[in-house]
Amino acid sequence: MRHGTCATSMVCNATASQQVCAALKFSFALKRRAGRFLPALAGLVCLFVAAPAAGAEMGNTPRAATWVTDGPVYAVVRTTDTVYICGAFHNVGPSGGTWTPRNHIAALDASTGFATDWNPNADSYVNALAVSGDGLTVYAGGQFTFIGGQTRNRIAALNATGNAITTWNPNANNVVLALAVSGDGLTVYAGGGFTTVNGTTTRMRIAALDATGAGTATTWNPNANDIVNALAVSGDGTTVYAGGQFTNIGGQPRKYIAALDAAGNAITTWNPSASGNVSTIAVSGTTVYVGGAFVTSIGGASRNRIAALNASDGLATAWNPNANSYVYALAVSGTTVYAGGAFTTVNGTTPRNRLAALNATGTATTWDPNAGNYVGALAVSGDGSTVYAGGGFMTIGGVSRTYFAQFCSVPTAPTNPGATAVATDSITWTWQDNSSDETGFKVYSGVGPTAPDTVTVTTIAGATQWQHTGLTPNMQYAFQTAATNGYGDSAKTENFTTWTLAVEPVAPTVTAKSDSELDVKVSADANPESTVFAIRNVTSGNWVQANGSGGASPVWATRTGWGTVTVIGLARLTLYRFTVTARNDGGVETVAGPEGSASTLPVGLSMMSVE
């Protein structure tokens, strides 16, 4: 099929529920700037992760064209046309290329991966991002006090179509670490280390802000007793999930995670009670995915740093990836959950360095980009074809990529392997092309029956067959193929085996033995010794049997097995013609070879008496 690209295949539904894709905000300077102890890592996640088609299989190699940064990336948001990133960087640019100044916040074209002209130019770290449902407003939170050319204390709203800042100005007195937008777009939820907004309005680390005016705090006031790292909104907009370091929120004891009524201050009865900090939350349907530093317990079950909770009762589901270190970011695409953090194994013993894709059972998929340092921000395009990762890494996917990388889906795997035009020295392997974005097909072909593990050739895009030449007659060969593009290979087809044809035999050697017998020998030819042959008595119209008699059915034996067979029961002084047919080990027969002939002797004579 036609060759496509990662960028042009990406489709994101620009809804509020999909635009704030899993993002973590990191800062090693938070302790000093917040005026109190904060963890080295704090998180923000999607308000709600919709469920597109099941997650595509990602390639391990990041896209080369997508620009990178010169400092850690704390959050990523993908809209239809734009990828917004923020963090501790000062420049963006192509990997190994020339830098373009962008202080702490930037927009990349979703198609090219290059920076757009959008440049709010923040004076300090930007830790959190969210985008309005119409895609026109970008909300930013962090430690900055100046952004978009205006004074804005730690939280601001920016026009997505230009650099102009809006009049929205909640004015938080301390760091903002998490942002989420309500489904109706009327409210922006903020979490972090602040204790006041709007200058003098007390809001202890969590607030709801009017999105349509100047950013005035609503009456919603859950009052957390410690840092709020993560926020997410349920799909129906009725529940706000909060995670962090708090142990009391909404006037009730809640250890590190809680569900709040979006319509009032009342906390719900949902109470998973984590054993440690929660850094990231992603809501998908009736499941709430969480990650953080907790070990041993959440939702009433033993779960290490990552878990899936029922939205109905807060109990842990059976999904249990079991990460061996912190989980900082989550993003959901269909039945696939992407997780980033500091871990080096999941599922107990499966190596996955800081980035993993987990299936519906919680088991790691084959995707293994191997990040060189922590992954703290994740986002997935709406169609699931692209994953964005940000963090503190300098290498990922086996190549140099500083702090930000884009992964694209590998092609859909080919199917229906087969073979046509099989000859004595060649096989034309065939397959069905199911992809629209491959650059070619890797053909694995070798002596069977074991599946080959070496690439014989890489074809062009759109190919559905390849002829393997220079083969040995009557030899079993195995074949598989995989579609490939610049980001990785699809799964291989199932192993398919077939045999090359045997070579058409030469004429048999026929000599007279007596007046009723002839000796027939299968002559040497290009076929290997394993090849079997049948001898046809053309004159009598029957097949030579093992004992030399004639029969209605062929007898198959190797050249050694036949030796010299004495054909019996013949008429004297009669010319007899014989042919030989070969059969390969796959059961395919050749045409009969040329004739060999001889006459029986007169009555009473034999070759011994003649001599």
Image (tube, rainbow, N blue to C red):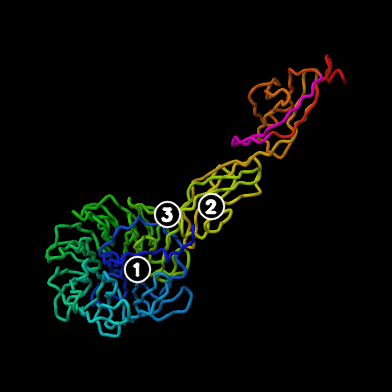
Residues at marks 2 and 1 touching, judged by CB atoms closer than 8 Å: no
Label 2 CA crowd tier, 10 Å (few <14, some 14–19, many 20+)? some
Name which of mark 3 and mark 2 comes first in the sequence. Answer: 3
Q: Which residue is mark 1?
A: 80
Label 3 CA crowd tier, 10 Å (few <14, some 14–19, many 20+)? some
Residue located at (36% from left, 72% from top):
73
Q: Nearer the viewer, residue 611 or 199?
A: 611
Residue 33, position as x, y percentages in the image: 27, 78
Residue located at (14% from left, 70% from top):
221
Q: Which residues are magenta?
A: 573-591
Secondary structure state at the residue bearing disc 3:
loop
CA gap, disc 3 and disc 2: 26 Å
The answer to whether residue 267 is magenta is no
The answer to whether residue 590 is magenta is yes
Q: Which residue is mark 2?
A: 464
Q: Is residue 519 left or right of residue 529?
A: right
CA gap, disc 1 and disc 3: 28 Å
The amino acid type found where label 2 is placed reads Thr
- State the quadrant of the C terminus: top right
Q: Is residue 36 left or right of residue 542?
A: left
Residue 307 is marked as: none
The amino acid type found where label 1 is placed reads Thr
Q: Which residue is mark 3?
A: 366
Q: Nearer the viewer, residue 74 or 388?
A: 388
**Residue 502 sits in quarter:** top right
